[in-house]
Image (cartoon, grey):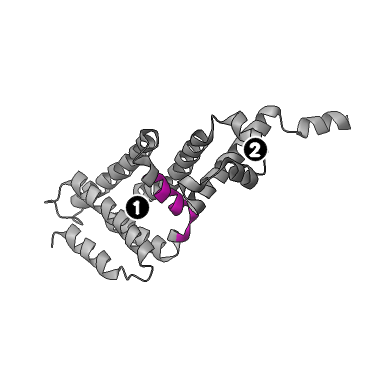
């Protein structure tokens, strides 16, 4: 009875394989953010994941494959946060200022930001990286467009602004401010936030 119970508690080979694969992807994503795309090695991934070197070759078709899959999975998880924020916000201003608050609270120190930047850089050379990220960013812009349209109906955003174009500008402003804060962590964003409020009101 005890032996049968112990065997039932053991993970199946499929579960073990899935856990090993997940550990490899997590390790590769972390190393991309820490070291940069070109400095990640198969040996380093195996050491970080705590698996034999051969396990990577068993589950993936080489270094490029594991890096690509790790980068896409990790970056999509990172992009899910701003998408959820945009979908849950009551206004463009709430979403914008909430993101600035996340920046100010140390969000830029999150390892996912480094992974995102490395993946975006690499995606300029690799369409298989660019396509899924482009689709996710498109969802973010669509959510922002819906926010702009709602704000226009409620009188919070001037109706003279095209909703989709305004959404693209707001998204680009957030991306640009992220880069400025990485280069200048002491940058005060209060004036930038007020400039965006003025823009949305129509002057």
In this picture, residue 183 sits left or right of residue 115 = left
Q: Is residue 72 magenta?
A: no
Residue 45 coordinates in the image, percent (x, y): 59, 43
Give the residue displayed 18% in from the left and 63% down from the top. Answer: 198
Q: Quadrant of residue 53?
A: top right
In this picture, residue 145 sits left or right of residue 42 = left
Residue 10 coordinates in the image, percent (x, y): 76, 33
Q: Of residues 203 and 18, which is closer to you in this image?
A: 18
Mark 2, other Cα within 10 Å: few <14 / some 14–19 / many ≥20: some
Q: How many marks?
A: 2
Name the residue beneath numbered marker 2.
Answer: 53
Marks 1 and 2, how far apart at CA:
45 Å
- Name the disc covering residue 89, or none: 1
Mark 1, other Cα within 10 Å: few <14 / some 14–19 / many ≥20: some
Q: Of residues 72 and 39, which is closer to you in this image?
A: 39
Q: Quadrant of residue 26?
A: top right
Magenta-highlighted residues: 109-120
In this picture, residue 43 sits left or right of residue 189 = right
- Name the disc covering residue 54, or none: none
Q: Of residues 125 and 111, which is closer to you in this image?
A: 125
Inspect this view and state whether residue 21 appears. yes
Residue 110 coordinates in the image, percent (x, y): 48, 57
Q: Secondary structure at mark 2?
A: helix
Give the residue displayed 41% in from the left and 46% down from the top. Answer: 79
Magenta region's main secondary structure? helix
Residue 28 coordinates in the image, percent (x, y): 54, 43
In the picture, the quarter occupied by the N terminus is: top right
Q: Secondary structure at mark 1?
A: loop
User: CB atoms at circles 1 and 2 under 8 Å apart?
Assistant: no
Work out whether 200 lies above or below 118. below
């Amino acid at each position: 009875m005890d032996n049968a119970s112990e065997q039932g508690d053991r993970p199946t080979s499929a579960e073990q394989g899935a856990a090993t694969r997940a550990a490899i992807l997590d390790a590769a994503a972390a190393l991309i953010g820490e070291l940069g795309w070109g400095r990640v090695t198969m040996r380093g991934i195996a050491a970080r994941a705590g698996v034999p070197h051969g396990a990577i070759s068993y589950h993936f078709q080489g270094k490029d494959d594991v890096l690509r899959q790790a980068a896409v999975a990790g970056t999509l998880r990172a992009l899910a946060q701003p998408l959820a924020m945009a979908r849950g916000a009551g206004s463009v201003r709430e979403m914008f200022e909430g993101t600035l608050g996340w920046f100010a609270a140390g969000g830029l120190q999150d390892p996912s930001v480094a992974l995102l930047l490395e993946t975006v850089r690499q995606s300029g050379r690799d369409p298989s990286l660019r396509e899924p990220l482009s689709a996710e960013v498109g969802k973010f812009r669509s959510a922002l467009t819906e926010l702009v349209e709602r704000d226009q109906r409620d009188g919070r955003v001037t109706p003279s602004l095209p909703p989709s174009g305004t959404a693209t500008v707001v998204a680009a402003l957030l991306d640009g401010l992220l880069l400025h804060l990485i280069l200048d962590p002491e940058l005060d964003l209060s004036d930038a936030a007020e400039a965006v409020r003025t823009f949305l009101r129509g002057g």
